[in-house]
Amino acid sequence: MIYQRVALIGMGLIASSMALAMREKKVAETIVGCAKSAETKATAIKLNLVNAMFDNPEEAASGADLVVLCTPVSAFKDITKRIVPYLKSGATLSDVGSVKGHVVRQLAPLVPDDVNFLPSHPIAGTEQSGPSSGFATLFDKRWCILTPPEGTDQQAVQRLIRFWESLGSKVEIMDHDHHDVVLAVTSHAPHLIAYTMVGVADHLRRVTNSEVIQYSAAGFRDFTRIAASDPIMWRDVFLSNREATIEILGRFTEELFALQRAIRTGDGEMLQEYFQRTRAIRKGVIEAGQDTGETDFGRHSTRPTSPQ
Ligand code: NAP
């Protein structure tokens, strides 16, 4: 056991996967949770994800050794204000939000001195949401980035590292603002591009919707999977990682214009050289064990993992 009592605030894809993995790996003695809707609470109990579900975050967090915020990022501040008076001395308060700078700036001032505030971000996910979408192997061999503020108790950091490692993750410590730039490149901007591409197809009146769906080729089909990701979660990601996303989108636009120019001027050499470089990056992702080289066109993979 790494923690006696763990409280998961929010019970969607990430929290339910954490609960299943914690149970399987016997990481916590007691797991409790809370969610907004009666339906989610009932599902969490039915699936035996937790020992108890509470109606409010205060009750769930009370007496817990580890409290993890697993709701959309926009709810973190209000929840933290509510639970702070109930946090046990020496407890760790963490989160799984996909952005870190904004979370640290909003929450750190609210956390009392005798509580360890240790933000984390498991780089693992799917486009599914809700308590039934979780699975115990979600974090297997996936990175989890911790962004502990300066001066955090090292024993608490080591304990949280062991926690994530027990769930199957590889752990990296990073500065919170650096995290946001890295994730803007690897996840946030690509999601926005997928949303845009699917939006473009939707607006193209020359191609009817049925043609877009019927002749959906590998590229577009992959975009539709990413563009099916949770609207609330992604609204929050862009609103709370504004600066880094806008910076990366600026660079993206420059590259797009360069490629557009190469196409217009018939510069095949430039295009080929560019695509050779991008192919090498794909090879690197596979070699790093972050995807397989299998050609499944998204058809037989029921548990796609995309870094989010
Ligand atoms: P999700 O499946 O949409 O679940 C969100 C959960 O939060 C639901 O159980 C919801 O309850 C609950 N909730 C919302 N507002 C609440 C409140 N005020 N009080 C208590 N519970 C509340 O979300 P998710 O995909 O697990 O994402 C959760 C967090 O993980 C987000 O911050 C996201 O940035 C981060 N993250 C997501 C991924 C991913 O791929 N999905 C990957 C890494 C990190 P109801 O069901 O009752 O509405």
Image (spheres, helix red, strand yellow):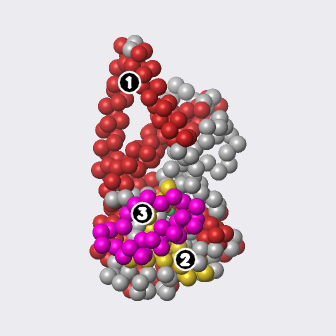
User: Circles 1 and 3: CB distance less than 8 Å?
Assistant: no
Tell me the kind of residue under disc 2.
Ile
The three-letter code of the residue at mark 1 reads Leu
Q: Earlier in the sequence, mark 1 or mark 3?
A: 3
Around disc 1, counting alpha carbons within 10 Å, would you say few (fewer than 14), some (14 to 19), or many (20 or more)?
A: some
Closer to the N terminus: mark 1 or mark 2?
Answer: 2
Q: Is residue 286 left or right of residue 250?
A: right
User: How many numbered marks, from 0 up?
Assistant: 3
**Which mark, residue 146?**
3
Measuring from the top left, give residue 127's x and y in whole percent: 56, 51
Residue at image x 38%, y 81%? 115
Q: Quadrant of the N terminus?
A: bottom right
**Residue 108: percent from the left, percent from the top?**
32, 72
**Looking at this view, is 46 or 258 the one in front?**
258
Instruction: Determine which of the numbered discs, if any, sits on residue 2 in the image.
Output: 2
Which secondary structure lies at badge 1? helix
The numbered dot on residue 176 is none
User: Which range of residues does the magenta coloring cover?
Assistant: 145-173
Q: Which residue is mark 1?
A: 259
Residue at figure coordinates x 34%, y 25% from the top left: 258
CB-based contact (under 8 Å), mark 3 and mark 2:
no
Residue 152 vs residue 184, the one in the foreground: 152
Q: Is residue 208 left or right of residue 195?
A: right
Disc 3/disc 2 C-alpha distance (Å) = 17 Å
Distance CA(mark 1)–CA(mark 2):
51 Å
Q: Nearer the viewer, residue 92 or 49?
A: 92
Q: Residue at x 41, y 16 (%)?
A: 269
Question: Foreground mark, 1 or 2?
Answer: 2
In the rendered image, residue 280 lying in the magenta stretch gets the answer: no
- Callout 2 environment at 10 Å: few (<14), some (14 to 19), or many (20+)? some
